[in-house]
Structures are given as structure tokens and as C-alpha cells.
């Protein structure tokens, strides 16, 4: 090398000596393009872009031979290359996310007609496992009794890796899917062969099969975990933030679908299993009944949502406001209010219970709560289950470290109430005047929106005052709702 100008000196190693062969001076690349151009009897006229690890730069290099000398032009294009690679990565991620979203949309469409937990898991496996986005996809059922996973099926190219997964489950090793179930949240492993949290046999098999990443997705609803999905992919970038978010949506909706199938069984079955459980101190209402020496009776609940399960409870034997103050300080409750206080030791309160409370656990597992009384050690929960429901599994979920005691169990035939029977029962509850006022208001479109008649107009047609009308309407509506919601 005869000479080097200042811009080239800034790019090349600072100790590049003049007078040495350029192959010794120029940094090394994988392709060795510069030394190759100077090999042989003449210099090759060539231009290329390469990455040079020694200086951590991308260089654009042009070798231009001429009479008596060869000029090597060098330009640092690292920033340009980085921008191009980022744009390429983002395009690839966007294309992958679009494909995954389409796959998951197909899965969700399939969930609509699924009638069982097995059918739901099969839908997920078949739609995702046959896609070229994943090496394979497997699903497992979570057994509450033992905390174990049971493989329900697999789709895709299993190779050595799925065998290692299956053996690790048998041996009780902490695979990503088990972690996802235990944490009730997804687990992402982006470098399968190097992640020390993954059992060694799975890491080795993943390396052998060329699988680099796994996403473990629990299928849950509320506090109940029904199963898990394990998706394995060949690249570390397979599970972008967007793809993870799409999978989490799938997990939520699949868990909801499993819960819905359980409720559907209970709704349409002709027979039900009625089970009485004893409740322990893991129930916040049991602890409150003990500390306040009160008996609490569940009057009813409102379907659980993101804010929790709303419960309406009658308090006997203690000050309702004091009971409310006690229960709302517990971690399992998310607020409450006093509805009414009949006297110093009787009243009704409203509570919102979090997912961990036994009442919520029972509902999330498809149980229909019949009655619940909380009276210290005599606390009882009576539920209806579908005939094929796993009673022992529910007992484990309701217990605290050990199954909740099963105090009684019987199969019952559901009796359907005809329209005529319902109307007859309602008529028995209403006075003649209440029935007349309620029917007149209904036929006069008082209950439509916008109203076809005002209270004054309905009252005038009945030749009563407006206040009397409202008094009769409130009484008759309460009896109507009681007839509908009573056992």
C-alpha cells in the first residue's frame, strides 16, 4: 500500500502501515473479497459491499486497477445498511403478523361451533399446526387435582423436540407450558437452545431440529386455567409484540369458549348433579363471619366481569356496616356498599369479589350456585353441575391446600316451568289491583322507550293518582322479578 487519505484512514485500522501488502492492511471479511481481487497476475476490477467484523462496519469497496497502480475506494455504509435491515425486518414482521392474524381469525371462527374443550383444542391445533409459520403446535389439558399437564394432541413436524417435550412432562420438568399454566400468563422463549430456564433435553432437541423460539399460551377464564397451547417456530423473530398480543386474545377467547361449553351443558341437560361443599377460611366471607360472629347468606350474584363478581349478602347477628368495613379491607374484595340496615344486627350489603374467591372459582368452572351460607365452621356452598362435571376437580379448586369437603351429592331431574305455570305463580303473588295496574301500564306502552304513555296518563285511565300508580307498579314489578329469579 503506497498511500491512504484521511477519510480512508478514519475507516481502516489506525495502525495501517504504508508499504505493506493491502491484504495485510485491509480488515478481514468473511468473503475475503479484497485479498481475492489482488491474487493472481492482475488485479480484478470489482465493487462490493461487505460486513467487516474487526471494525464492526459495513463497507462499500471498489477496486479500480490502472497503469502502474490500483486505487481502492472505501465508503462506510453501516448506517444505510442498518436502515435497510430495519426496514426489511419490519416488513417481514408485518407480513408475519398479517398471516398470524388471519390464522387466528380462522381459529376463532372455528371456536364458535365447538361444543367441548377437546373440540376447542383440536380447532386451535389444526388451524395453527398446519401453518408454515410454526414447526408444530401442541395442546394440553390442565388437571387441577394434580397441577399436571396431559397432552391432548399435536400438529406439525414433531421431530426430536416434541418427544423431548413429552418426556419432560412425564418427568415433571418445568417446561415453558407448565410455567405459563402456573403463572396464568404467556411465556416466550426466543432462544430455545440457550435459555437456561428450559430443561436441557428440550434445548438439545431444539438445536437439533432447528427450532429457536416457543410461545406458551394458557387457556383460562377468570381464575380457572383449562389448558395450554405450545407453539414452536424456527426463528427467534416469530413472536413479535403484535403476534404475542394476537395469541393472548386467542387465549382469552378460547378460555371463555371452554367456560361457555360447560355452562351450555348445564343449561340444556335434563339432569344435574347437586353438590354441597364445606367452605374454609380461604373464603373471605367465612373469615368475616367468624371475626364478626355474624351469619351471612348469599341472596344472589351478577355474572362476573373485569371488575369482579358482584354479590348481594344478607347479614344477621352483627352490625351490617361493621361487617362491610371488615370485608372490604380484604385482598379478595374490590369494594362494596350498604344497601339497607333493618336494625343494628340485620341488613343487606353488596360486595365485589376478586377471582381468587371460592364463589368466583365455582362460577368460572361452570357451576350454578344454588345457595351459600357463611357461618364460621358451618359454612356451606350448594351448586348445580352438569352430570359429567369433575366434582373432585372443583373441590380441589375450592379448597385451601386440600380439597373442600363434599358434604352431600345427588343427581336431580330438572323440571321445566311452562308459560302457564309461571303466569299462574305470578298471579298468585299479585293482588288484583297490582295485576290491573301492571297490565294497563304494559299495554299503554309505559315501559317502551320513548314511552307511549306517561305515568299521569296511565293513572288517569285507572282513575287513581300518579303516586298510587307508582306505588302499585313498584310492588308488582318486584313480585314479577322475584317470581323470575326465585328458585
Image (cartoon, helix red, strand yellow):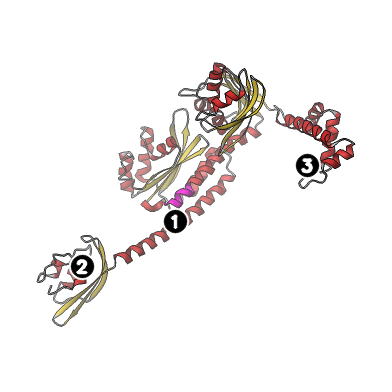
Q: Quadrant of residue 300?
A: top right
Residue under label 3: 447
Instruction: Nearest to the eye among marks 3 and 1: give it.
Output: 3
Q: Are marks 3 and 1 in contact (CB under 8 Å)?
A: no
Q: Report helix, strand or loop for mark 1.
A: helix
Please give the name of the residue rendered at 50% of the width and 53% of the height, measured from the top-left corner. Answer: 101
Q: Looking at the image, tell me whether mark 2 or mark 1 is earlier in sequence order.
A: 2
Is residue 242 rendered magenta in the image?
yes
Q: Looking at the image, tell me whether mark 3 or mark 1 is earlier in sequence order.
A: 1
Q: Quadrant of residue 409?
A: top right
Give the magenta part as a residue range: 240-247
Is residue 469 rendered magenta in the image?
no
- Image quadrant containing the C terminus: top right
Q: Report helix, strand or loop for mark 3.
A: loop
- Image quadrant containing the N terminus: bottom left
Residue under label 2: 10
Counting from the top left corner in percent of width and height, residue 255 is at 53, 40
Is residue 184 shown left or right of residue 344?
left
Magenta: main secondary structure = helix
Counting from the top left corner in percent of width and height, residue 141 is at 47, 36
The answer for how far apart the CA atoms under marks 3 and 1 are is 52 Å
- Disc 3 packing (10 Å; few <14; some 14–19; many ≥20): few
Q: Are marks 2 and 1 in contact (CB under 8 Å)?
A: no
Is residue 368 shown left or right of residue 462?
left
Please give the name of the residue rendered at 57% of the width and 49% of the height, measured from the top-left corner. Answer: 109
Instruction: Nearest to the eye among marks 2 and 1: give it.
Output: 2
Is residue 32 shown left or right of residue 228?
left
Q: Identify the mark at residue 96; answer none if there is no mark.
A: 1
Above or below, comparing residue 73 to residue 372 in the picture: below
The answer for how far apart the CA atoms under marks 2 and 3 are is 84 Å
Q: Report helix, strand or loop for mark 2.
A: helix
380, 391: nearer the viewer: 380
Amino acid at each position: 500500500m503506497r498511500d491512504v487519505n484521511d477519510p480512508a484512514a478514519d475507516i481502516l485500522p489506525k495502525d495501517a502501515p504504508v508499504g505493506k501488502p493491502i491484504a495485510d492492511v485491509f480488515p478481514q471479511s468473511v468473503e475475503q473479497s479484497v485479498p481475492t481481487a489482488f491474487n493472481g497476475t492482475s488485479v480484478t476490477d470489482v465493487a462490493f459491499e461487505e460486513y467487516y467484523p474487526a471494525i464492526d462496519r459495513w463497507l462499500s469497496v471498489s477496486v479500480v486497477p490502472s497503469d502502474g497502480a490500483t486505487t481502492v475506494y472505501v465508503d462506510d455504509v453501516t448506517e444505510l445498511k442498518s436502515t435497510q435491515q430495519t426496514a426489511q425486518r419490519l416488513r417481514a414482521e408485518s407480513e408475519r403478523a398479517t398471516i398470524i392474524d388471519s390464522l387466528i381469525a380462522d381459529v376463532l371462527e372455528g371456536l364458535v361451533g365447538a361444543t367441548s374443550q377437546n373440540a376447542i383444542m383440536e380447532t386451535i391445533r389444526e388451524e395453527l399446526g398446519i401453518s408454515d409459520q410454526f414447526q408444530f403446535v401442541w395442546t394440553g389439558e390442565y388437571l387441577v387435582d394434580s397441577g399436571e399437564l396431559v397432552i391432548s394432541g399435536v400438529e406439525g413436524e414433531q421431530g426430536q423436540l416434541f418427544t423431548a417435550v413429552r418426556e419432560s412432562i412425564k418427568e415433571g420438568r418445568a417446561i415453558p407450558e407448565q410455567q405459563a399454566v402456573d403463572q396464568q400468563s404467556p411465556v416466550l422463549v426466543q432462544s430455545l437452545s440457550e435459555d437456561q430456564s428450559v430443561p436441557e433435553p428440550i434445548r438439545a432437541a431444539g438445536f437439533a431440529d432447528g427450532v429457536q423460539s416457543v410461545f406458551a399460551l394458557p387457556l383460562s377464564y377468570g381464575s380457572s386455567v383449562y389448558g395450554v397451547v405450545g407453539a414452536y417456530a424456527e426463528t427467534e423473530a416469530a413472536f413479535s409484540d403484535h403476534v404475542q398480543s394476537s395469541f393472548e386474545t386467542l387465549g382469552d377467547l378460547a378460555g371463555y369458549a371452554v367456560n361457555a361449553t360447560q355452562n351450555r351443558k348445564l343449561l340444556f341437560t335434563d339432569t344435574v348433579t347437586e353438590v354441597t361443599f364445606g367452605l374454609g377460611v380461604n373464603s373471605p366471607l367465612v373469615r368475616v363471619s367468624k371475626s364478626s360472629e355474624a351469619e351471612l347468606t348469599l341472596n344472589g350474584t351478577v355474572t362476573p366481569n373485569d371488575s369482579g363478581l358482584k354479590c348481594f349478602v344478607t347479614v344477621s347477628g352483627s352490625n351490617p356496616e361493621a361487617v362491610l368495613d371488615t370485608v372490604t379491607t380484604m385482598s379478595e374484595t374490590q369494594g362494596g356498599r350498604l344497601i339497607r340496615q333493618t336494625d343494628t344486627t340485620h341488613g343487606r350489603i353488596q360486595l365485589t369479589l376478586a377471582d381468587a374467591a371460592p364463589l368466583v372459582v365455582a362460577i368460572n368452572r361452570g357451576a350454578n350456585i344454588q345457595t351459600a351460607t357463611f357461618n364460621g365452621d358451618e359454612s356451606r356452598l350448594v351448586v348445580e353441575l352438569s352430570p359429567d362435571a369433575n366434582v373432585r376437580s372443583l373441590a380441589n379448586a375450592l379448597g385451601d391446600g386440600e380439597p373442600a369437603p363434599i358434604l352431600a351429592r345427588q343427581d336431580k331431574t330438572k323440571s321445566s316451568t311452562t308459560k302457564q305455570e309461571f303466569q299462574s305463580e305470578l298471579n298468585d303473588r299479585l293482588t288484583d289491583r297490582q295485576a290491573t295496574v301492571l297490565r294497563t301500564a304494559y299495554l299503554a306502552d309505559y315501559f317502551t322507550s320513548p314511552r307511549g304513555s306517561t305515568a299521569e296518563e296511565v293513572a288517569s285511565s285507572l282513575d287513581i293518582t300518579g303516586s298510587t300508580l307508582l306505588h302499585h307498579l313498584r310492588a308488582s314489578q318486584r313480585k314479577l322479578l322475584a317470581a323470575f329469579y326465585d328458585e
